[in-house]
Image: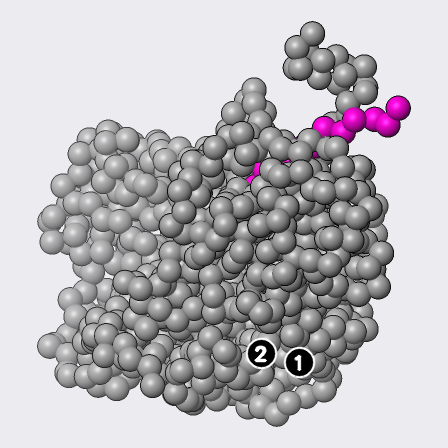
């Protein structure tokens, strides 16, 4: 039996389960808030074209508009200035095999519940590896914070000095990229960087280092609590937008049931 | 003395709401000039440029010297009520529904006689103060009021037909984040508004001013985002039947010329200022239109707060001006579509606001409080057009005088300090 | 500006053949139908064939989009003199005035003067809404009371100024009702008491129900021809002693308390060669009693402001001391549109020729007919009056002049 036939059988008998890690595209879902004089992320919007009515008697369809970074979305290297000159750096040119990759899930939800500005460091990652084993090269590192369980206001958690949400520091990323060899970094929050990441040294370390090293980002993930620390397979193919810096997408995880 | 208007009871579900009817609407073309001025609350009559005779009813040629050079000029709003009749019969359904109805012959200080609606605190032989307003048909009419303020005089049923008084009415402010909306709340309360619905977009964005504003007992929060069709639809489904006055406070403005404004910003301006208004119209206007005669707290006014540069582009704010012009165009069409419903459309034109997005502009900027007070005054007086602030007044005057020259002038107002 | 000499008399011309098409409250017919019936009645009563009528003059509110021109084709007329008089309550006298001159000058042999209107359920309202530009712009939007509102204000101002009592107005209405009871097609068929008048329901304060006319359908007409033509046809005829016409008089008056008659009444009496006390009956335009009172004053039957005493000093029935609106007038018979501008003239022709439909005024020899028309904005614009003499009186006047 070939590998795919085995997978198909496992999926059919429930040994392998599919988990949806995606938020619904909804006009009410928060988007990144930047200082007002900067360009802003367009929220998801939808306009009905017809709904079994005079505009189209037998069918229903809608137009939608949004930013490449609205809702659960994928960040390509070209998104950041550090990745702008890399080869295959936009969603339409990234080699497709990168879109299907193993994932590890590091659960820091307890730490984040205690500290909404929790910073993930290299030491945290190494400690996790001590428990769960070395991260296999080419894996996604998914940072579980349980942030996706918050209501919209607590999720964006905006205050006068900006958003407050957890994220990694430069050391964590240097380790994950150069030592662990991850394909990308996935988070539940609205950005791969911490809410206060702008004030880190260097600013926005996740965006800067991930994309400067041709790695990817996944944001606004949910249901990470349904994944094992090790062993899930992630399927996350963005829309093939010409020169796209990212795209909303459906993120799926294949999870093997514990025997 | 006018009896104070009691707070209307809740609707009796077994009764049909009164269908809107209107007073006679047809007018000659010249008389439309009277209506256009009445819509601004201006009492103007034609004066012959050659002989100085005042013409009324509106004419095409002077009845004294046959000059055709008749010019609209402000009149002293004074007169004397020569004769009063209280009508108990009319050929028009609108009036039949509202009998008895007081009309009278007034001799104006300008030495012409006019027919006018007559306030209940005016008696035959009294000196009167004249106002010109649009009626429920949207046409200009005259009304004789007492010279001095009398108790509860705004509650006179005939006067209330001409105004859009917030008293006992429910008001929707479409975007409570706007500083104008926040300034409107205490003024609307002061004018007797029963409920103020505060439209709030993106409630996940915390804002102290909003928290304070919605803490008021009169204020009810209503989730509403004018850039989101679904949100507008859901808000209208929830409170649309209770909105007697809608004040569109949602606005998006960015400095920038046609050559350099980022398209996404220009599009946002359109999304809010033009499409936002269009969405509100499509979901809120139909139910308001159906409630134009729904008792003492009938739907009465749709209010747009528009930049005066809707009239003529200010190149420093090119795309903003364009979106405001688009909104004005829509408001004009909406006014036509409201005809017959008794709901007025009031446009309040304002100049640059004291607002971060007008920061480089030199004074005199209009404060949110000033814009709010002009808006509430406009409602209380039943205007369809009001102007807030010195810059807006100046631009409107120049536009009325010669829009072509104004366009040239505004080219040189390209630079901001 | 002085007048260029004395006015020519109306010698040799007479008015004859008074006809009335019985009124109906509502009619689904057109104005053309009512005018056609009046023409048929004129032909039958005179014995003239259609092609013998070479002059035609019409007044009607509900003829639109047609005018007198359209009616020539519609009715197969081929006139060499044609007029259309849109003067409402002044139409009858003005038609007589013009037709008389046309016949006198030889421009026409026989002129048919006709006024008629239909009254469909909505025609009164339609007529008001498109009555005039000034009323559309500056009167109708104020309560849409139509003439009720205008005359309420005029009545109020008149009462305020001259102290005229409602009882005086009431007496006019009560006496006219007495005359109307003899007219079979009159809208009002019951006697009216002063008490009923005073206590009727309010229409437009101070006007109550019996101050107002009831709109209806109907037509009135008469012929104007040379005296010898009438004699040849054996038609009893009436002479025109004098006429006046005035429009937009006293436009500077703040509110209408007087009409154009006051400007021209001296000429009316001097041309007629009679004085008011020689008049046997008066037909005023009577859409509201205040206007009857105004005509009595302005034509010189009493002093300005003295009408209250004048009315109370008389009985105004056919057998009274001052016979007035002897067919019941519009107040009791009904207002058949423009025919309301003819009703008094046609009635005067009947009374002077002894052909009264209802009660006959004894020894009626001199009649005054007065017209008032068109509340264009806040007041009536057109005024007119004529002094007429029946066969007996005409001979007497000629003898006196000789």
Can you tell which mark lies on residue B372? Answer: 2
State yes or no: residue A249 in magenta: yes
Along the line of sight, which residue is nearer the eye, B152 or B301?
Answer: B301
Can you tell which mark lies on residue B187? Answer: 1
Identify which residue is drawn at 18% across, 56% down: C101
Which secondary structure lies at badge 1?
helix
- Locate residue A134 relative to residue C362 in the image: left or right: right
Question: Which quarter of the figure is the C terminus of chain B placed in?
Answer: bottom left
**Which stretch is magenta?**
A248-259
Contact, mark 2 vs mark 1 (Cβ under 8 Å): yes
Determine which quarter of the picture holds residue C167: bottom right
State yes or no: residue B292 in magenta: no
User: Residue C393: percent from the left, percent from the top?
Assistant: 33, 61
Identify which residue is drawn at 71% across, 75% down: B208
Chain containing mark 2: B
Identify which residue is drawn at 26% across, 42% down: C68
User: Residue C294: percent from the left, percent from the top?
Assistant: 47, 74
- Locate residue C326 relative to residue A84 in the image: left or right: right
Q: CA distance from mark 2 to mark 1?
A: 8 Å
Q: What is the residue that sits farthest to the right in this orientation?
A: A259
Q: What is the residue that sits farthest to the top in this orientation?
A: A1
Determine which quarter of the picture holds residue C232: top left
């Amino acid at each position: 039996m070939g590998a795919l036939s085995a997978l198909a059988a496992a999926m059919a008998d429930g040994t392998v389960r599919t988990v949806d890690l995606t938020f619904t595209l909804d006009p009410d879902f928060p988007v990144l808030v930047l200082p007002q004089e900067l360009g802003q992320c367009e929220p998801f919007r939808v306009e009905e074209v017809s709904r079994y009515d005079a505009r189209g008697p037998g069918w229903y369809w809608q137009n939608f508009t949004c930013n490449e970074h609205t809702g659960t979305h994928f960040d390509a290297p070209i998104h950041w200035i550090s990745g702008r000159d890399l080869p295959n750096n936009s969603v339409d040119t990234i080699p497709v095999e990168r879109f299907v990759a193993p994932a590890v899930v590091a659960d820091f939800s307890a730490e984040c519940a205690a500290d909404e500005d929790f910073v993930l460091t290299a030491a945290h990652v190494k400690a996790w590896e001590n428990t769960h084993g070395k991260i296999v090269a080419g894996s996604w590192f998914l940072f579980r914070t349980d942030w996706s369980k918050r209501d919209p206001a607590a999720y964006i958690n905006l205050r006068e000095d900006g958003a407050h949400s957890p994220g990694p520091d430069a050391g964590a990323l240097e380790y994950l990229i150069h030592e662990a060899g991850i394909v990308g970094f996935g988070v539940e929050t609205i950005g791969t960087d911490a809410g206060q990441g702008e004030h880190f040294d260097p600013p926005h370390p996740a965006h800067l280092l991930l994309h400067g090293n041709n790695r990817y980002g996944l944001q606004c993930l949910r249901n990470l609590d349904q994944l094992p620390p090790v062993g899930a397979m992630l399927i996350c193919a963005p829309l093939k937008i010409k020169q796209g810096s990212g795209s909303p997408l459906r993120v799926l995880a294949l999870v093997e049931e514990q025997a | 003395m006018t009896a104070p208007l009691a707070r209307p009871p809740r609707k009796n579900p077994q009764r049909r709401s009164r269908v809107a009817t209107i007073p006679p609407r047809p007018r000659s073309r010249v008389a439309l000039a009277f209506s256009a001025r009445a819509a601004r609350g201006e009492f103007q009559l034609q004066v012959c440029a050659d002989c100085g005779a005042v013409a009324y009813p509106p004419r095409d040629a002077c009845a004294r010297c046959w000059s055709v050079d008749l010019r609209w000029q402000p009149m002293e709003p004074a007169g004397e009520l020569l004769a009063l009749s209280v009508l108990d019969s009319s050929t028009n359904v609108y009036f039949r529904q509202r009998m008895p109805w007081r009309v009278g012959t007034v001799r104006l200080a300008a030495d012409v006689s006019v027919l006018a609606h007559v306030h209940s605190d005016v008696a035959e032989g009294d000196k009167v103060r004249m106002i010109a307003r649009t009626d429920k048909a949207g046409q200009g009419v005259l009304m004789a009021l007492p010279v001095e303020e009398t108790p509860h005089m705004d509650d006179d049923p005939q006067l209330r037909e001409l105004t859009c008084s917030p008293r006992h009415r429910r008001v929707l402010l479409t975007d409570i984040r706007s500083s104008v909306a926040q300034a409107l709340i205490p003024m609307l309360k002061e004018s007797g508004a029963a409920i103020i619905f505060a439209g709030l977009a993106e409630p996940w964005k915390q804002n102290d001013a909003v928290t304070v504003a919605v803490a008021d007992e009169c204020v009810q929060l209503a989730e509403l985002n004018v850039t989101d069709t679904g949100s507008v639809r859901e808000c209208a489904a929830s409170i649309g039947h209770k909105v007697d006055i809608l004040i569109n406070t949602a606005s998006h403005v960015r400095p920038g010329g046609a050559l350099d404004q980022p398209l996404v910003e220009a599009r946002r301006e359109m999304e809010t200022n033009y499409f936002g208004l269009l969405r509100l119209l499509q979901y809120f206007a139909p139910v308001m239109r159906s409630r134009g005669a729904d008792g003492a707290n009938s739907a009465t006014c749709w209010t747009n707060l528009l930049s005066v540069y809707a009239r003529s582009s200010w190149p420093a704010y090119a795309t903003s001006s364009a979106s405001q012009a688009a909104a004005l165009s829509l408001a004009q069409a909406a006014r036509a579509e409201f005809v017959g419903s008794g709901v007025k459309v009031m446009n309040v034109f304002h100049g640059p606001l004291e607002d971060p997005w007008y920061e480089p502009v030199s004074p005199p900027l209009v404060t949110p409080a000033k814009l709010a007070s002009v808006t509430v005054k406009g409602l209380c007086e039943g205007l369809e057009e009001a102007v807030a602030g010195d810059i807006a007044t100046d631009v409107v005057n120049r536009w009325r005088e010669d829009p072509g020259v104004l366009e040239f002038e505004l080219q040189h107002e390209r630079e901001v300090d | 500006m002085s007048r260029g000499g004395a006015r020519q008399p109306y010698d040799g011309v007479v008015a004859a053949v008074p006809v009335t098409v019985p009124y109906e409250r509502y009619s689904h017919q057109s104005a053309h139908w009512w005018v056609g019936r009046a023409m048929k009645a004129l032909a039958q009563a005179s014995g003239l064939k259609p092609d013998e009528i070479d002059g035609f003059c019409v007044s009607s509110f509900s003829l639109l989009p047609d005018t007198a021109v359209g009616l020539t084709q519609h009715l197969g007329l081929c006139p060499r003199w044609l007029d259309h008089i849109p003067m409402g309550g002044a139409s009858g006298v003005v038609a007589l005035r013009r037709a008389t001159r046309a016949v006198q000058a030889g421009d026409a042999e026989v002129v048919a003067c006709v006024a008629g209107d239909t009254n469909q359920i909505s025609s009164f309202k339609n007529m008001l809404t498109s009555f005039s530009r000034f009323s559309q712009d500056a009167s109708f939007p104020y309560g849409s009371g139509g003439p009720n509102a205008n005359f309420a204000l005029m009545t109020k101002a008149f009462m305020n100024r001259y102290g005229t009592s409602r009882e005086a107005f009431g007496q006019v209405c009560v006496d006219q009702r007495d005359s109307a009871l003899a007219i079979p097609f009159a809208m009002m068929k019951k006697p009216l008491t002063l008490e009923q008048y005073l206590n009727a329901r309010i229409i437009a304060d101070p006007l109550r129900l019996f101050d107002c006319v009831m709109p209806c359908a109907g037509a009135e007409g008469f012929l104007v021809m040379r005296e010898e033509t009438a004699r040849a046809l054996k038609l009893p005829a009436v002479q025109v002693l004098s006429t006046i016409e005035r429009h937009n008089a006293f436009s500077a008056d703040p509110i209408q308390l007087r009409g154009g008659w006051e400007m021209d009444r001296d000429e009316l009496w001097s041309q007629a060669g009679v004085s008011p006390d020689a008049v046997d009956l008066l037909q005023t335009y009577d859409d509201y009693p205040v206007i009857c009172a105004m005509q009595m004053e302005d034509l010189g039957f009493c002093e300005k402001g003295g009408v209250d005493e004048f009315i109370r000093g008389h009985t105004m029935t056919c057998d009274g001391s001052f016979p007035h609106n002897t067919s019941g007038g519009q107040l009791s018979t009904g207002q058949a549109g423009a025919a309301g501008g003819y009703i008094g003239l046609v009635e005067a022709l009947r009374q002077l020729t002894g052909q009264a439909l209802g009660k006959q005024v004894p020894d009626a020899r001199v009649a005054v007919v007065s017209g008032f028309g068109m509340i264009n904005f806040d007041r009536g614009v057109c005024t007119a009056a004529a002094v007429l003499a029946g066969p007996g009186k005409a001979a007497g006047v000629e003898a006196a002049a000789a």
